[in-house]
């Protein structure tokens, strides 16, 4: 069971795969914008951060990565600064404040939880050891301002945060989908659907009608493009322990970034959606073994040439 201390920094065992990370997400489909603020620290107390703001089709407004920052072992996430990224936590599992300013882009982002923090250990099979000792997943109301040059974009919407610690071995995966959905304050969903170590994993929760329940099954039907191998449309059907069925249909993709992550290549995309019949926002992060995607894109290119009659 998660405790208030789990919303703060943990003591990690030394080793190349030991890692603790925080991620905060913001997607504004009406602006064709996405934002990821990410920071991590390893078992040797060496930290890094990434801030990225992006539009459609991997168009990057800013993508700034800082690595190799030695941190005081006593430094905690109550007040955590790595490069231009500054994260402050308030009441455990309730609120956080994220800011950055770099190269004419700045963010002032306040997160207030919609649902109780969820641990993948609450799923039937628990949290896989290669994925983390534990993970804290939580949707929230997010307010603030994103500034891009002279453009000031206030927002009052929903978002998601993740806090994970322990062994983080992403190369155990062939593929995963990590999906976050909100419909105002009424519905909050997080799930991970992945193939790793010869097993299919179905993790996460559904929060709706004032009740939160672990997911027991996930159906996924995804269409992808031949340029980025990122979703163009998707339908997910979730069943939780209460027996509720929650259907999610994405709209047209409005933001996308492709970036290397832990030996895989991540595709983070978002759009408007419907969830249980209500309008919402969906974020789909897909991690793939790079060589697999390269082969799929090459195959698609060959197929297009054949259809065009090239080489006949």
Image (cartoon, rainbow, N blue to C red):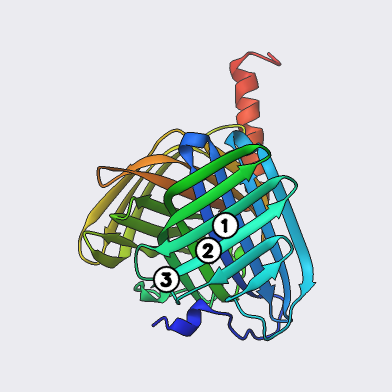
Considering depth in this image, is 1 or 105 the residue closer to the camera? 105
What residue is at 30 percent from the left and 55 percent from the top? 187
What residue is at 62 percent from the left and 14 percent from the top? 308
Judge left or right: residue 16 versus residue 7: right
What residue is at 51 percent from the left and 35 percent from the top? 31
Q: Which residue is mark 2?
A: 196
What residue is at 69 percent from the left and 53 percent from the top? 101
Q: Secondary structure at mark 2?
A: strand
State the image coordinates of residue 14 (x, y, percent, origin top left): 70, 84
Number of numbered discs: 3
Proximity of marks 1 and 3: CB atoms separated by less than 8 Å: no
Proximity of marks 1 and 2: CB atoms separated by less than 8 Å: yes
Considering depth in this image, is 50 or 214 the residue closer to the camera? 50
Quadrant of the rendering where the N terminus is positioned? bottom left
Closer to the chain start, of discs 1 and 2, is: 1
Q: Which residue is mark 1?
A: 174
* Image quarter of residue 263: bottom right
Q: Which residue is mark 3?
A: 94
Closer to the chain start, of discs 2 and 3, is: 3
């Amino acid at each position: 069971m998660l405790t208030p201390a789990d919303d703060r920094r943990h003591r990690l065992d030394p080793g190349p795969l030991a890692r603790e990370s925080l991620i905060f997400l913001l997607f504004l489909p009406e602006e064709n914008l996405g934002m990821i603020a990410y920071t991590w620290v390893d078992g040797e107390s060496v930290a890094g951060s990434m801030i990225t703001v992006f539009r459609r089709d991997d168009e990057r407004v800013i993508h700034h990565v800082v690595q190799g920052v030695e941190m005081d072992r006593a430094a905690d996430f109550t007040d955590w600064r790595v490069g231009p990224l500054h994260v402050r936590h308030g009441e455990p599992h309730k609120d956080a404040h994220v800011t950055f300013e770099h190269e004419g882009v700045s963010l002032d982002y306040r997160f207030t939880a919609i649902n109780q923090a969820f641990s993948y250990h609450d799923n039937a099979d628990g949290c896989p050891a290669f994925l983390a000792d534990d993970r804290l997943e939580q949707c929230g109301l997010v307010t603030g301002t994103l500034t891009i040059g002279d453009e000031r974009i206030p927002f009052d919407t929903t978002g998601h945060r993740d806090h994970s610690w322990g062994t983080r071995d992403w190369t155990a995966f062939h593929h995963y989908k990590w999906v976050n959905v909100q419909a105002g304050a009424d519905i909050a969903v997080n799930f991970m659907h992945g193939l790793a170590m010869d097993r299919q994993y179905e993790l996460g929760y559904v929060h709706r009608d004032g009740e939160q329940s672990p997911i027991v099954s996930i159906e996924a039907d995804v269409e992808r493009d031949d340029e980025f191998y990122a979703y163009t449309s998707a339908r997910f059907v979730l069943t939780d322990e209460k027996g509720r069925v929650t259907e999610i249909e994405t709209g047209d993709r409005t933001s996308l970034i492709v970036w290397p992550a832990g030996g895989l290549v991540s595709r983070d995309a978002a759009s408007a959606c419907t969830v249980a019949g209500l309008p919402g926002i969906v974020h789909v992060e897909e991690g793939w073994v790079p060589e697999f995607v390269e082969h799929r894109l090459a195959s698609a290119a060959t197929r297009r040439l054949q259809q065009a009659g090239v080489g006949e």
